[in-house]
Amino acid sequence: TYPIPAALAEGSHAIKVDAQDNDGNNAVQRLVNITVDTVPPQLSVTSPVQNLVTKTAALAVTGTTDDMTSKPCTVTVKVNSGAAQTVPVGSNGAFSTNITLAEGSNTITVVSTDKAGKYTTVIRTVVLDTVAPVIGVVELSKNPVSTGETFTISVTVTD
């Protein structure tokens, strides 16, 4: 056991181990590399935008992720209370997957996790509205009207 006198900085470090027995015999030095990672990965979700309202249930979730210290990152996408699905991440950090929205408000949770277990979460709310508005009563303030007369049209629409 060896207490490290000061905290190690972010990044890669080499630890050298030497040993000698009581007879003066030296062991072959061993070198172990470790990485200190205290910073979660960067995560940018480019699609969908927050508070998107759409009439199409199929939706692409796209973005990029990166971590300077603990590559590669993994990405999961979860819709509402469903299971999180792992999404392939390209060597450039780009990811894309298609999801299916439920009618109404949907919560999309995207999580990027680096090799050290640090993670970043982005949440988007998207509304699926496939129900067309209904035109109700249409009333005219004056009917019939003559050319050039002013009249009012009142319409009730529900959505």
Image (cartoon, rainbow, N blue to C red):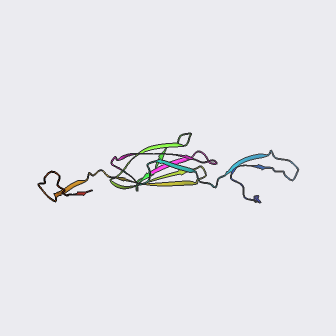
Number of numbered discs? 0
One can see residue 87 in this view: yes
The single residue placed furthest to the top in the displayed view is: 91
Q: Residue at x 58, y 45 (%)?
A: 72
The C terminus, quarter of image: bottom left
Residue 138 vs residue 109, the one in the foreground = 138
Q: Position of residue 108 (x, y in %)?
A: 43, 53
Q: Which residues are magenta?
A: 54-77
Task: Report the front residue among 58 and 53.
Answer: 53
Q: Give how far across and how far down residue 113 sits, in percent.
A: 55, 51
At 77% across and 49% down in the image, what residue appears? 16
The residue under the point 44% across, 44% down is: 97
For residue 58: magenta?
Answer: yes
Q: Position of residue 121 (x, y in %)?
A: 51, 55
Quadrant of the frame with the N terminus: bottom right
Q: Residue furthest left?
A: 144
Query: As displayed, is residue 6 above or below residue 28?
Result: below
The residue sitting at the front extreme is 148
Task: Name the image quarter holding residue 143.
Answer: bottom left
Q: Is residue 82 magenta?
A: no
